[in-house]
Image (cartoon, grey):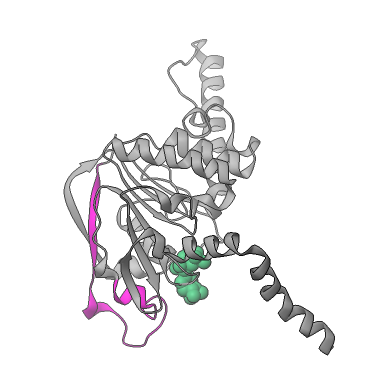
Amino acid sequence: MKTSIPFVRGVRLRRDSVPRSAVYPFSLAAVQQVERLRLERGITFFAGENGTGKSTVLEAIAILLGFNPEGGSTDLRFETVARSSSSLHEHLELLTLDGSADDGFFVRTEGLFNLATEVDRQDEEMEEIAREAKRWSGVTMTGYRPLSNRYGGGRSLHQQSHGEAMLALLSNRLGGGGVYLLDEPETALSPLRQMALLSVMHRLARSGSQVIIATHSPILLAYPGARIYRFDEDGIDETEYEETDAYRVTRDFLDHRERSLRTLLAADEVGEDDR
Ligand SMILES: Nc1ncnc2c1ncn2[C@@H]1O[C@H](COP(=O)(O)OP(=O)(O)OP(=O)(O)O)[C@@H](O)[C@H]1O
Ligand SMILES: [Mg+2]
């Protein structure tokens, strides 16, 4: 049975239910200003420095949509001991756009290994059922499409390198017309594969998908016409590509590599002399 997944217009913080003491996640300026997010179909980015709350907010939206918080979907759910998500989703109300999707997925790099294990486990379980059925009835089960086809392009995600598995997952599993949340999908990807991801994003955008991506990648952020939200210590603001740190810092480093390196490494040399 296909689940209907709403397109997201934004979230509202139920301020009356928020604890008075400023504990995580309510201590984050981005959480206090989370209502500033105006989400549409197409591509939206969450950009900004480490620790500003991008994953916290993205994960809360994923949970509100019914996705597996470790990455996955409404139908691919699994849980491992090591994860801890914030309670933010309990204090947020999801605001939706008209229409809904019948596909959706939450991709997070740190969940890729567990997701690959779950895909293999389900395929092995199905193979076992098929073997048993054949043994008892002599009938060969047909029509089952292994999940590794749908997720890994025909190969187990575990038999691919980190970056290969990530791009295979994004290219194969994200079918289009859905709601897709991606948390730093670039982490494992070479610059060339990040460019390949731009064309996956374009296919998704043209099929009417809603794609929300937390990223530090100046390559992904270059997607034309995307809305970019900058998360920082003051909260959340919409910004332009050229204003993002990812673009400015990378560009400045590459344009002035020698100078940047001299400055960065000089501090260490002083430290060594002083020892
Ligand atoms: N379970 C937790 N308990 C307490 N604090 C947490 C928890 N998870 C995250 N934090 C803190 O909340 C802040 C925001 O974390 P979050 O992971 O949302 O940042 P981020 O913007 O996604 O950063 P990055 O770019 O490094 O992925 C960080 O300072 C982090 O240390
Ligand atoms: Mg993060």
For the question of whether residue 41 can be seen, the reply is yes
Q: Position of residue 70 (x, y in %)?
A: 47, 54
The answer to whether 9 appears left or right of 84 in the picture is left
In the rendered view, does 184 fall on the left or right side of 32?
right
- Name the one closer to the observer, 193 or 39: 193
Q: Residue at x 37, y 85 (%)?
A: 22
Left or right: 274 with respect to 119? right
Residue 268 at x, y percent in the picture: 75, 79
Q: Inspect the magenta stretch and tell me whether residue 39 lies in it.
A: no
Could you tell me if residue 84 is visible in this image?
no
- Residue plotted at (36% across, 79% down): 234
Magenta part of the chain:
4-33
Q: How many numbered circles are shown?
A: 0
User: Outermost residue toward the top?
Assistant: 138
- Where is 111 relative to 84, above or below? above
Q: Nearer the viewer, residue 245 or 180?
A: 245
Residue at the farthest left position: 98
Q: Position of residue 174 (x, y in %)?
A: 40, 38
| Above or below: residue 254 compared with residue 159 | below
Q: Considering the image in quadrants, where does the N terminus appear?
A: top left
Q: Residue at x 44, y 46 (%)?
A: 72
Picture layout, residue 202 above or below residue 213: above
* x 21%, y 80%: residue: 16
Q: Quadrant of the C terminus?
A: bottom right
Q: Depth check: 169 or 144 in front?
A: 169
**Residue 146: x %, y % from top left:** 50, 27
- The quarter of the picture where residue 28 lies is bottom left
- Is 144 left or right of 39, judged from the image as shown? right
